Image: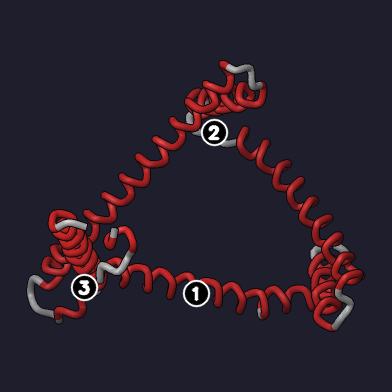
Amino acid sequence: MGPDGRVGVGMSVFVAFVVGVVAILSLLLGDNPALFGAQPGSEELARLIALPGDVLLRLVAIVITVSIVVGIANLLFVHIGRVARGKFYSAVLLASFAFTIYWYVTTKGDTSLLEAVQVPIESALAALLFLSLAHGGSRVIQKRADVWGLLFVAVVLVVLLGSLPLADLALVKAWSDWLMAVPVSAGARAILLGIALGTVVAGVRALLGQDRSFRG
């Protein structure tokens, strides 16, 4: 990498560091006017400090929105090219997209069509999930008939049976509710904590210029 390349990388790191620090301070201090005490004008000062963070968040939202629009346009152009080559499924996708846009515009945002399509699809996916779990449980018993395999099958059966609206399964439903409230909730929180820590580490690497995009 030549001198010009190193200067470009250094400027990128500097801009990323400054923008990151400004955004963090703006979001932390702007949302807590009590940190400035009860002095006159403290709320106005907090509002001014929060302004850069709000502007950056709006810019991010605009960039994400434009990216989604560009992605949709690219997807449409790809399927238009496939329709020209005689691809039937691409024609169905384009017709569905056009009809959905037409329905949404003419009915002023009515989502009944979306719900009429989405609910059956979700039910079909739930049925497929049930069959996949049942098949996976049978495979676990065949391939790995140990304590952990039996525990997995027992938990799956308790959760599936507890979801049935039958009065005779009240005890099973109680166990199912406990599993969802304690172990599943603990696992979900652990996953969220892992995501949060990973995001913090990635942000620190970007601020310090250690990310690969800045190192070239």
Q: Are marks 2 and 1 in contact (CB under 8 Å)?
A: no
Front one among 26 and 153? 153
Q: Earlier in the sequence, mark 3 or mark 1?
A: 3
Q: Where is 3 relative to 194, above or below?
A: above
Q: Residue at x 66, y 41 (%)?
A: 118
- x, y percent for residue 29: 21, 73
Q: Would you say 33 lies left or right of 74 here?
A: left
Label 2: how many residues lie within 10 Å, few (<14), some (14-19) or many (20+)?
few
Q: Which mark is residue 141?
A: none
- x, y percent for residue 169: 88, 71
Q: Are marks 2 and 3 in contact (CB under 8 Å)?
A: no
Front one among 68 and 139? 139
Q: Which residue is mark 2?
A: 110
**In the rendered image, which quarter is residue 68 located in?**
top left
Q: Residue at x 21, y 66 (%)?
A: 17
**The N terminus lies in which quarter of the figure?**
bottom left
Q: Residue at x 83, y 76 (%)?
A: 149
Q: Which residue is mark 1?
A: 194
Q: Which residue is mark 3?
A: 29
- What amino acid does circle 1 point to? Gly
> For numbered disc 2, what is the local secondary structure?
loop
Front one among 33 and 15? 15
Q: Earlier in the sequence, mark 2 or mark 3?
A: 3
**The C terminus lies in which quarter of the figure?**
bottom left
Q: Where is 149 relative to 165, above or below?
A: below
- What separation in Å lies between label 2 and label 3 (alpha carbons)? 41 Å
Q: Residue at x 84, y 72 (%)?
A: 153
